[in-house]
Image (spheres, rainbow, N blue to C red):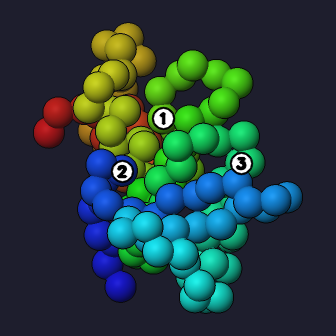
């Protein structure tokens, strides 16, 4: 199944502390009771210190969960797929000119254009 582009501003599942654990709720406020869905959420291993947790309702969403660290005032963070993080960071922070290779990506031994950040940031 292909990845679906998701955003934490879309309706999703939420988490609330309940006793020593957590309970999960749908966007409409109803309690999540499906054991398969609960096991998927547990496998995400969202840290217990995260507050304002958003969980993707789709198992094939590219962004599965976000939250705010209670001890930190940083913006939302969360586990994401590394390929999306790498692609986004290349758009925001291109490789400095001194670090770029003068060879074409196919001439660089031991790397490919998809695995090498220098090659991926180089204009074609």
Q: Is residue 102 visible?
A: no
- Percent position (x, y) of residue 45? 70, 59
Which residue is tagged 3? 47
Tell me the element at label 3.
loop
**Residue 70 quadrant:** top right
Mark sitting earlier along the chain (1/2): 2
Q: Is residue 86 visible?
A: yes
The answer to the question of whether label 1 and label 3 lie on touching residues, with beta carbons closer than 8 A, is: no
> Between marks 1 and 3, how big is the CA–CA gap?
13 Å
Q: Nearer the viewer, residue 53 or 113?
A: 53
Q: Tell me the number on the disc at residue 8.
A: 2
Query: Who's the residue at 47% across and 74% down the image?
Result: 30
The quadrant the C terminus occupies is: top left
Mark sitting earlier along the chain (1/3): 3
The answer to whether residue 82 is left or right of residue 92 is right
Q: Nearer the viewer, residue 102 or 120?
A: 120
- Percent position (x, y) of residue 114? 37, 52
Tell me the element at label 1.
loop
The answer to whether residue 20 is left or right of residue 63 is right
> Between marks 2 and 3, how big is the CA–CA gap?
17 Å
> Between marks 1 and 2, how big is the CA–CA gap?
10 Å
Which residue is tagged 1? 76
Tell me the element at label 2.
loop
């Amino acid at each position: 199944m292909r990845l679906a582009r998701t955003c934490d501003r879309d309706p999703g599942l939420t988490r609330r502390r309940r006793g020593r654990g957590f309970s999960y709720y749908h966007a409409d406020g109803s309690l999540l009771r499906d054991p398969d869905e609960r096991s998927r959420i547990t496998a995400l291993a969202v840290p217990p210190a995260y507050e304002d947790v958003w969980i993707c309702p789709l198992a094939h969403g590219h962004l599965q969960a976000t939250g705010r660290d209670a001890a930190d005032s940083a913006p939302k963070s969360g586990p994401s797929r590394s390929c999306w993080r790498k692609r986004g960071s290349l758009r925001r922070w291109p490789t400095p000119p001194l670090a770029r290779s003068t060879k074409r990506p196919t001439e660089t031994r031991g790397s490919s254009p998809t695995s090498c950040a220098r090659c991926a940031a180089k204009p074609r």
